[in-house]
Amino acid sequence: MLVAIGKGIELHIDVTRFNTEVHDHLVRTGLRNLLMDAHASATAKADPEGYVEKSRELAEKKLASLYAGIVRVQSVAGVAKPTDPVSAVVMRLARRAIQKEKASDIAAAPKDQRLVLSIDWLPNMHSRMIWY
């Protein structure tokens, strides 16, 4: 697994070398960070009465999306959006063409499944992964 750690540094990680305790710690820490990020927008300042309930709802929604196989990834290093203008235009045109072709399928799907359907057809990307 290639992991970008910042400053342009990428490390190849052999996750099979982690023992059970280390693996559990990594999973716990990663899930905690993802779930904390998911509910960070619910603050006491914005909603003094219901911010804890809203926080729980947001965290549970994130957990449900993870269970469903939906991962939102912001590319910092490694695979990212094209930076040169020609590649960016080609990707934009390709996405529009595919979206137009699949628009009726996406529109007919339940709202919570549209995001998944809209990216299932993207070639050369991990299943159910959204890059933005």
Image (tube, grey):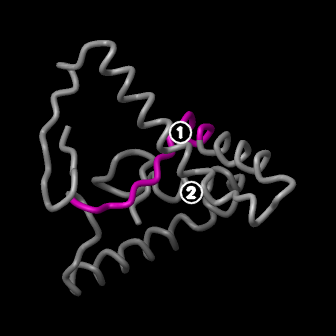
Left or right, residue 21 beside residue 115 = left
Looking at the image, residue 14 sits to the left or right of residue 47; the answer is: left
Magenta segment: does it hold 43?
Answer: no
Residue in view at x 18 percent, y 43 percent: 2
Q: Callout 1, which amino acid?
A: Leu
| Residue 8 at x, y percent in the picture | 14, 61
Foreground: 130 or 107? 130
- To which residue does mark 2 refer? 115
- Quadrant position of residue 53: top right
Quarter of the image where one finds residue 63: top right
The outermost residue toward the top is: 20
Q: Give whichever of 26, 132 is nearer the camera.
A: 26
Q: Which of these two is toward me, 116 or 101?
A: 116
Q: Position of residue 115 (x, y in %)?
A: 56, 57
Whole-Å distance between the Cαs marked 2 and 1?
A: 13 Å
Q: Is residue 59 left or right of residue 102?
A: right
The amino acid marked with disc number 2 is Leu
Q: Residue furthest right?
A: 49
Which mark, by number, is residue 66? 1
Image quarter where the C terminus lies is: bottom left
Instruction: Name the mark nearer the viewer: 2 or 1.
Output: 1
Find residue 49 and report its horizontal and vertical position in percent: 87, 54
Magenta stretch: includes residue 67: yes
Measured along the vertical axis of the image, is residue 80 above or below residue 33? below
Q: Which quarter of the rendered picture does the N terminus lie within? A: top left
Q: Label 1: state its secondary structure.
A: helix
Identify the magenta region. 63-77
Q: Nearer the viewer, residue 124 or 47?
A: 47
